[in-house]
Image (cartoon, rainbow, N blue to C red):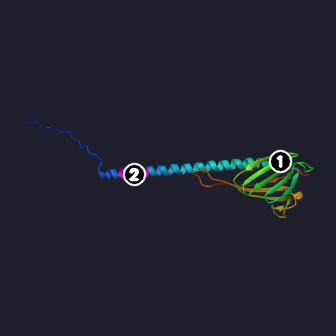
Amino acid sequence: MGYKIISNKKRHGAMTLPEMMVAIALGSIVFLAVGSLTLYSARSFSSMVNYSDLNQTSRTSLDYMTLGIRQSRGLQSRTPTNLVFKLDAAGSNLLTYTWNQSSKTLFQVTTTGTNIVTDTLLTNCTFWTNETFQRNTVSNSFALVSTTNPALTKLIQLNWTCAERRVNATNTESIQSMKIVIRKKG
């Protein structure tokens, strides 16, 4: 009687070279995709933080300037880089906004008697302009009448651009424009 030997041998082989190359190629593609997505997300997040900071600074500056200009007694003088407002009827107390183009900084200087307070409102301010207008509009339109006479000025338009660059971020810019009405006159 013969015995029949039944073998349950299964093939236990290692990966072949072509299988290994395909696995490495697929793994590399997945790794590159995840790495690119991570890098792109980090740059986007950094840019968003940059925009948020610039807008917060511009908003705070806008609030300070609006409060000061609206409470002033009128414009005393104006140049492309300076605005000087009277804080009292006599014009002895002044509120000045000065843009220093070389340092890219906008300053607010409040002069009351012998007390002078200087605050930095904007830094990295690459562009700043101011325009003055009368109260009335051009006939048959909503356009305001421009003026160079400080005594006739009722509305101030300010425009500025601030830029900033952080590590791993592209340059970001915040462009602001506002019109402020002088409420008190005289």
Q: Position of residue 143 (x, y in %)?
A: 81, 62
Q: For residue 28: magenta?
A: yes
Amino acid type for the residue under numbered disc 1: Thr
Q: Nearer the viewer, mark 1 or mark 2?
A: 1
* 14 or 91: nearer the viewer: 91
Within-10-Å neighbours for mark 2: few <14, some 14–19, many 20+? few
Q: Which mark is residue 25?
A: none
Question: If the image is split into quadrants, where does the N terminus sit?
Answer: top left
Left or right for 8, reference 41? left
Left or right for 68, reference 21? right
Left or right for 162, reference 80? left
Residue behind mark 1? 110
Amino acid type for the residue under numbered disc 2: Leu
**Looking at the image, which residue is at 48% across and 50% down?**
35
Q: Earlier in the sequence, mark 1 or mark 2?
A: 2
Residue behind mark 2? 26
* 142 or 53: nearer the viewer: 53
**Looking at the image, which residue is at 90% across and 49% down?**
92
Q: Is residue 27 above or below residue 133?
A: above
Q: CA distance from mark 1 to mark 2?
A: 66 Å
What residue span does the magenta drawing correspond to? 22-30
Q: For residue 78: magenta?
A: no
Q: Is residue 99 above or below residue 3?
A: below
User: In what element is the residue under mark 1?
Assistant: strand
Q: Position of residue 22 (x, y in %)?
A: 35, 52
